[in-house]
Image (spheres, rainbow, N blue to C red):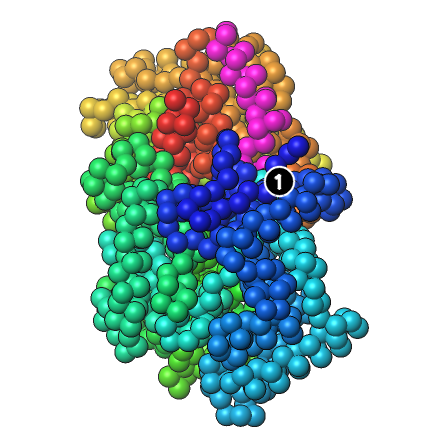
Amino acid sequence: MTKWVYAFGGGAADAMTGDARALLGGKGANLAEMARLGLPVPPGFTLTTEVCTAYYANDRAYPAELEGQVEEALASLEKKVGKAFGDPANPLLVSVRSGARASMPGMMDTVLNLGLNDDTAEGLAKLSGDRRFALDSYRRFITMYSDVVLGVPHAEFEEILERYKEEHDFQLDTEIDAAGWEEIIADYKAAVQSALGEPFPSDPRDQLWGAVGAVFGSWMNDRAITYRRMYDIPASWGTAVNVQAMVFGNMGDSSATGVAFTRDPSTGERGYYGEFLINAQGEDVVAGIRTPQCLTKTMREKMGDTQPSMEEALPQVYGELAKVFDSLERHYRDMQDIEFTVEMGRLWMLQTRNGKRTARAALKIACDMVDDGLITQEEAVLRVDPSALDQLLHPTIAEDYKRDVIAKGLPASPGAASGRAVFDSDEAEHRASLGEKVILVRVETSPEDIHGMHAAQAIVTARGGMTSHAAVVARGMGRPCVSGAGEIRIDAGKKQFTARGRTITDGDIITVDGATGEVLFGEAKMIKPELTGDFGKLMGWADAARRMKVRTNAETPADVQTAKEFGAEGIGLCRTEHMFFDADRIAAVREMILSEDQDGRINALAKILPMQRDDFAQIFRIMEERPCTIRLLDPPLHEFLPHSAEDVKAVSEATGLPADALMERARALAETNPMLGHRGCRLGITFPEIYEMQARAIFEAQALVEKETGFKPVAEVMIPLVATARELEILKVRVAAVARDVERESGVAPVYLIGTMIELPRAALRAGDIAEFAEFFSFGTNDLTQTTFGLSRDDAGKFLGAYLEAQIFERDPFVSIDQDGVGDLIRIAVERGRAARPELKLGICGEHGGDPASIRFCESVGLDYVSCSPYRVPIARLAAAQAALKAK
């Protein structure tokens, strides 16, 4: 019989085989591990991720044996704690929490204080000697259960509570006494009855199965699906459900709850970092309902807080907690994110996990742990998420910029960004999709805001602390965040906020500085980051570990220089057509296209030649002897022609050609499907003078730079869109002839290879034939994906979201390589190409070259290099190192 339920607590946990995280989820695995370590963990049991998988595979029905195993685990739990589930005299209360294999903070549902009803609430009051505490827990349970399980919105209960506080002139929930909670609970129950037409469920077992179903159901809620898509978490993993005996942080001034990190998650500095609340439950800290207090005296003084820290308010328990921090960090050999509760002076550990951190913190923690001997250099390389490096590769606010500060809050997630203020997550997502940079401003964020947070450049909240939802999620995403900016007064209806006597309305440009906690008016002056220190150290370790080279896709001197500074080892794709659009040469390009015969084209090309030669010379000077793959003209000619009446008139005046003749030529060149038309090598075959001019510009630039500098520039001439070996054979002969002419004229023998871009399925399948004439293949995965799927990258966005939601595509194939289809074509091309030419150089130059998952695939098939945009070069370097280490 399959074991669906695993127990933990009391210094032990059920034995299991295999990957604990895969079976029990991250939370369940860590609870079991803490129990085995002898740490104070409230006992409980975990319903495995396999239950979730079976639940969805069987039309949301549970395995037949599950109910019996849950009853058995519940009986064992009752024995451990000496209480009975549903017993009015001695009630056991439990929490029901999710626990996926990968951390998904706030994305799925939780229910606390489960097991309460009118009778057990009175029993809890007698046992604790505190009726106010018991009723406070009961109202919390009704609110949470109704929202999560019954679908009665949380806002309805908040409205009742706020109304009561206003009537009695209360500011805080803690001011409400037992009689007040009794009155509020009655109103809560009436709200449920009104909304559902039936009373709030009172049977604890019904409550338990309702909560379990809600947690499993939340695996497929919108915010969880969005989060998984962002972080590439497969839906097939499922979530576990953890049922755990409740401990109470809301039992008076000797009780507390908190969230803490064993190091600063923003900077990586050593030292405990976190927040706590006296007489509270965990939801109060993460939801920002009350302003939390600092964990340590040092942190309190640094923040300028006047409320006592936990170190000062509860020194004995704090000392115990500090020992647990050290124990867990040594055991897991990583910075830990910990949730704890203090119940009447007794410490309980509710969760530990590897803490989410900024890229800067990840680098420092990894490097410090290597220095401390906790981990190896290779482990350090594997610890840092390559995509997170993007946080370090973009500007910060210049020191000499005069700041116009309009508000200040907590520096929740570092970095700086400017954009237009928006007050709604849907609006943020919409405007970002139109290319607009936006800053999301909210009173506080909730998991429902995940899409807006992802779309925004930065986040500002009026409420919440350093461990609030906004802060934790923003750090994980690498978004700058200022939280708890209490001086901001937001009017969501009017789409504006006021602070310091100023009003900022929807669309006004503001800047967020997540390092200082400041919100500035206007767009701040930014500076490029310094990529030294821990960054340089880790990248050095990564470079030593990786096998594949990393190049860049670039053609402007500025981009080439940036890529070189980021560690690019060559150019994997120089798109020569981008050079044709410059204002000082587009007229000559159009003249060439509009020419009626070859002589006219040659005359026009002669004007372009010196411009292209200068382009290539600038690139070769920067790249020195690093290889540069230069793609000859690829797009169809009509793209260079004017289309609007205004453009036609300007070209007519510049060329002397009549406007009607220009329009006729444009119509003649227009194609029904230009992506599959007269472009790429087909231009070289029909208009050989174009490719011959470009080849001459490349080889003459090499000769020029070699004579100037003594360097021997290396050119890899790429013929695009080859489908047959014969196309490449014809064009290779022409390019090689130009190289000989330049060598004869200049006295310099250019160092070059001739190869092709594999971007058509036929080319991949006939790679063996093509390799007879190609010295390198560069996989153009953008077009290879389009031609394999029959999708237009420019138009697929209209329906791609639906395909991802329906799990037709697990990932966007234009972001991460489709390893089954496109990947198989690449594997075939690699195998057949190298069989024909063992020394064949292989690389990838599509946008996938900067995607870590795609880079892992490239390592697995044995490519020599990946090429990506300049700002993704460090990401690719680290991802290539991780791929090599994991392949060992």
Give the percent coordinates (x, y) of residue 277: 39, 71
Q: Nearer the viewer, residue 96 or 787?
A: 96
Q: Residue at x 50, y 57 (%)?
A: 81
Q: Position of residue 827 (x, y in %)?
A: 54, 19
Give yes or no for residue 726 being in the magenta stretch. Answer: no
Which quarter of the figure is the N terminus placed in?
top right
Which residue occupies the foreground of this view, 737 or 278?
278
Picture coordinates of residue 120 (x, y %)? 61, 70
> How crowded is the residue under tag 1: few (<14 C-alpha within 10 Å), some, or many (20+)?
some
Residue 633 seen? no
Name the foreground residue: 389 vs 759: 389
Q: In the image, what residue occupies the spot 56% across and 9% down? A: 769
Residue 828 colored in magenta in the image: yes
Eyeballing the image, is 638 above or below 168?
A: above
Segment tinted magenta in the rendering: 811-836
Q: Quadrant of residue 304?
A: bottom left
Compared to 762, does 58 lie above or below? below
Q: Identify the secondary structure beneath mark 1.
A: loop
Q: Which residue is mark 1?
A: 4
- The percent coordinates of residue 412 (x first, y second) are 37, 63
Q: Quick check: 700 left or right of 41?
A: left
Q: Which residue does the image show at 39% across and 54% down from the upper left?
A: 40
- In the image, what residue type sits under mark 1? Trp
Q: Is residue 879 among the parts visible in the rendering?
A: yes
Residue appearing at x 20%, y 24% in the figure = 710
Left or right of residue 345: residue 792 = right
Does 853 appear above or below 474? above
